[in-house]
Image (tube, grey):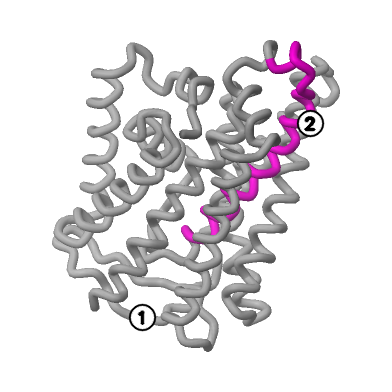
């Protein structure tokens, strides 16, 4: 495998973890069910991206926009149903949301595993433990040019997001609600509107992550629980700060790729889980503490 191919793999996997983490931070939910739903959305967007590409044979940039947009719409409505259920304590809405979530989690992975995959590079990584097929859902265009287009769009999205949530009034309101929702309401900020905005942005970022997971190198069995564990690790290693969290995401991608190449993906997973346990033991008394979400800082 060439250095160029490995570089694209690294960038796609790093951005996948980065956008996953941003999505979880933005939604900022204290509900475990919603967190699992976000993990499921990441897989769902990979499903939609794969099917759109297989059935329509569209350019990757268009697949990127359509799959992320559709997933954003689906999960925004889904999470708003949860938000309304827990906000109003409506038994009917809560029951509907719970049933929808159960069906969502039960059916998403079998759908994902049955995607007809087109392999552009019929090669395997030189792994001592297992061979992992390189799969891209590329169209007939030059894959490297396609990759550059997608990466350019991604960088633009990140820059726009950083500007909005750092220098605009809406960004200040979002940060205020995440730090202390009651105080934000006291100074006239509508927490309901901010919740809708952050849920929409968070869903979009999870959708972008799903697209990257559908295009990155490893044809692996990913589920929402595994993703949640890795996302928590990125948040902890990033010390709850946005730039450091993105750096931690690429660090995680680097570890996963290198260990998989020289050993196996299973061993890479063991290392990642062990690292998370060690870090949590040193920094927090409770594993997977939701305190990470509540105290996230944007700078």
Residue at the location (68% across, 41% down)? 103
Region rendered in magenta:
184-213
Q: Which mark is residue 189?
A: none
Look at the image and tell me whether residue 248 can be seen.
Answer: yes
Q: Position of residue 198 (x, y in %)?
A: 67, 36
Q: Nearer the viewer, residue 271 or 236?
A: 236
Above or below, 8 relative to 172:
below
Does residue 244 appear left or right of residue 63 in this picture? Answer: left
Residue drawn 23% across the image and 26% down it: 278
Residue located beneath label 1 in the image: 121
For mark 1, give the secondary structure: loop
Q: Is residue 207 magenta?
A: yes
Task: Classify mark 2: helix, strand or loop.
Answer: helix
* Depth check, front residue: 163 or 87: 163
Left or right: where 284 falls relative to 116: left
Cα distance between the residues tagged 2 and 1: 46 Å
Q: Main secondary structure of the magenta part?
A: helix
Quarter of the rendering occupied by the N terminus:
bottom left
> Mark 2 near mark 1, Cβ–Cβ under 8 Å?
no
Residue, disc 2: 193
Q: Position of residue 225 (x, y in %)?
A: 46, 37
Can residue 110 be seen?
A: no
Instruction: Verify whether residue 274 appears in magenta.
Output: no
């Amino acid at each position: 495998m060439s250095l160029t191919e490995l570089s694209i793999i690294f960038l796609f996997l790093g951005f996948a973890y980065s956008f996953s983490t941003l999505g979880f931070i933005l939604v900022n939910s204290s509900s475990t069910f919603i967190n699992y739903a976000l993990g499921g959305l990441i897989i769902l967007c990979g499903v939609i991206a794969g099917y759109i590409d297989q059935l329509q044979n569209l350019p990757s940039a268009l697949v990127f926009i359509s799959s992320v947009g559709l997933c954003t719409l689906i999960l925004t409505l889904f999470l708003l149903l949860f938000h309304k259920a827990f906000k109003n304590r409506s038994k009917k809405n809560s029951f509907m949301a719970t049933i929808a979530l159960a069906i969502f989690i039960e059916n998403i992975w079998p759908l994902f595993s049955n995607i007809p995959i087109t392999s552009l590079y019929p090669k395997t990584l030189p792994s001592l433990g297992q061979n992992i097929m390189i799969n891209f859902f590329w169209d007939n265009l030059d894959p490297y040019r396609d990759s550059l287009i997608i990466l350019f769009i991604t960088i633009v999205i990140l820059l726009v997001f950083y500007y909005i949530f750092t220098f605009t009034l809406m960004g200040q309101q979002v940060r205020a609600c995440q730090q202390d929702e009651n105080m934000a309401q006291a100074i006239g900020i509508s927490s309901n509107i901010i919740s809708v905005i952050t849920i929409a942005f968070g869903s979009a970022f999870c959708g972008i992550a799903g697209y990257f997971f559908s295009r990155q190198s490893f044809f692996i069995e990913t589920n929402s629980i595994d993703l949640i564990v890795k996302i928590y690790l990125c948040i902890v290693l990033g010390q709850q700060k946005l730039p450091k969290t993105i750096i931690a995401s690429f660090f995680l991608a680097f570890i996963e790729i290198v260990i998989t190449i020289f050993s196996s993906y299973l061993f890479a997973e063991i290392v990642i889980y062990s690292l998370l346990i060690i870090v949590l033991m040193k920094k927090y008394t409770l594993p997977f503490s939701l305190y990470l979400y509540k105290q996230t800082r944007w700078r």
